[in-house]
Image (spheres, rainbow, N blue to C red):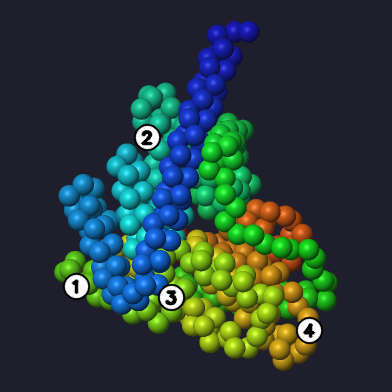
Amino acid sequence: MNSYQIKKIRRVAAVLLAAAIVGVLSALVADTLKVITEHYEALFLGVLHQNRFLIFIIPLIGLSTIHVLRYFLFHNKANKGIKEVLDTINKNGNTLPSYKISSHYFNGLLTVIFGGSTGIEVSTVVSTAAIGALSSRKVSYLRKYRTDLVCAGLAAGVTALFNAPVAGFLFAFEVFTRRRSKLHTISVVTAILASYAITRLFFYKQVFHFKVTEWNTYALPYIVLLGVLAGLNSVYLTKSVLFFKKFFASFHNDYIRIIGGSLLISALIFFVPNLYGEGYEGIKHVFSQVNVPSMTLMLPLVAVLLLKPIATSVTLGAGGDGGVFAPSLLIGAFLGLIVCVVLNHYFGLGLIPVNFVLIGMAAVLSGSIHAPFTSIFLVCALADNYILFIPIVIACLISKWVAHAVFPYSVYTYQPKVALKRAV
């Protein structure tokens, strides 16, 4: 074995060791954030059950605290979410400094527990991607493997959050980079395995308990219909986020933006409590209704379907930290149940509600992030089985196609048009 081969082996070993460390650290960040968020979100929801009117101050406290932390601790720079990671990878820019780990961690936590209508997924992805970026800066010969370690970190974060290693792997490749080098792939896999081991050993808790037993082929036309509707709802969510971010950016006074945004969030949650936080409690509530679905459920279901995109968009526009992962899952769950209940009530089709709830979750997520295969394996991991694999694939591919045909951008990829000045 010559010296070149020895150096190559050492280089690969160093990158894989770094990826494993990134995977462990990413799991600790993602899992602790998940556990703390769930605890305090449940605590605040319990307080609100005793006094509903407290909702008119809780989001204001959260957004104000985020603003104070951002101003005094985090260089007074706004968090840009997934775009920060995309810029780091695609523009080869150093846009993920180490403080992004703590800023997204605490801002994501504060946003959700104080009622912000979004989830911790994007906060986790950026934090864990920043861990990968930090590792590439600390060791000089790892700098040229920054993309590999950034992708390793974010894939490990998604793996830990959903206990879904395949979804974590696909998310890195569908959304962020399509590099095909063996070292890149092995680095991401190494981080995922390390993250999965830590999560399974110390933090594993099944979020949802689904009882999926079968699906019927006669439901395929209605699954196609659900995929089309999911694509349209994905566009509605995307355009809502883009509109309200632009709207709130027009306010030059931060206090007006925070107070106005928090009051609007409070009002929405006051009338539709399922809009509070991540919305996973809302999904659990939906599953408690699937065995006795009826048309009396329609009004609250439709209210969530129409208002969740607005609540999420206002949260993000007013300064909250988060993204469209959790909102997409909630919207999809409600959409799936609505479609199933309406079809069963008016046409007596005998469709299985729990199946449509799960398929809807995957389909809306697929259309929102333009990553169908991530959505497929993530929801199959949440269901803890692959019985619905084929209908989920069909719905996700249709949803992504419809969403892309109507509006060819996700919230991650949209770039606002800059007006060109005419030369005179």
Instruction: Measuring from the top left, give residue 35's x and y in whole percent.
Output: 45, 49
Q: Is residue 299 above or below residue 187?
A: below
Quarter of the N terminus within the rendering: top right
Q: CA distance from mark 1 to mark 2?
A: 36 Å
Amino acid type assigned to the residue bearing label 3 in the image:
Pro
Amino acid type assigned to the residue bearing label 2 in the image:
Leu
Q: Earlier in the sequence, mark 4 or mark 3?
A: 3
| Label 1 residue SS | helix
Local packing at callout 1 (Cα closer than 10 Å; few below 14, some 14-19, many 20+) is few
Instruction: Measuring from the top left, give residue 411's x and y in whole percent.
Output: 44, 64
Residue 13 visible in image: yes
Residue bearing the label numbered 1: 256
Look at 64% across and 60% down and name the residue there: 209
**Disc number placed over residue 273 in the picture, else none:** 3
Q: Earlier in the sequence, mark 3 or mark 1?
A: 1
Q: Is residue 379 found left or right of 245 in the rendered image?
A: right
Instruction: Measuring from the top left, give residue 148's x and y in whole percent.
Output: 50, 36
Q: Is residue 46 found left or right of 8 in the rendered image?
A: left
Front in this rendered view, residue 19 or 65: 65
| Label 2 residue SS | helix
* Labels 1 & 2 near each other (Cβ < 8 A): no
Q: CA distance from mark 4 to mark 2?
A: 54 Å
* Labels 4 & 2 near each other (Cβ < 8 A): no
Q: Earlier in the sequence, mark 2 or mark 3?
A: 2
Local packing at callout 4 (Cα closer than 10 Å; few below 14, some 14-19, many 20+) is some
Amino acid type assigned to the residue bearing label 4 in the image:
Leu
Amino acid type assigned to the residue bearing label 1 in the image:
Ile
Front in this rendered view, residue 215 or 171: 215
**Disc number placed over residue 134 in the picture, else none:** 2
Judge depth for marks 1 and 2 and give the one in front.
Answer: 1
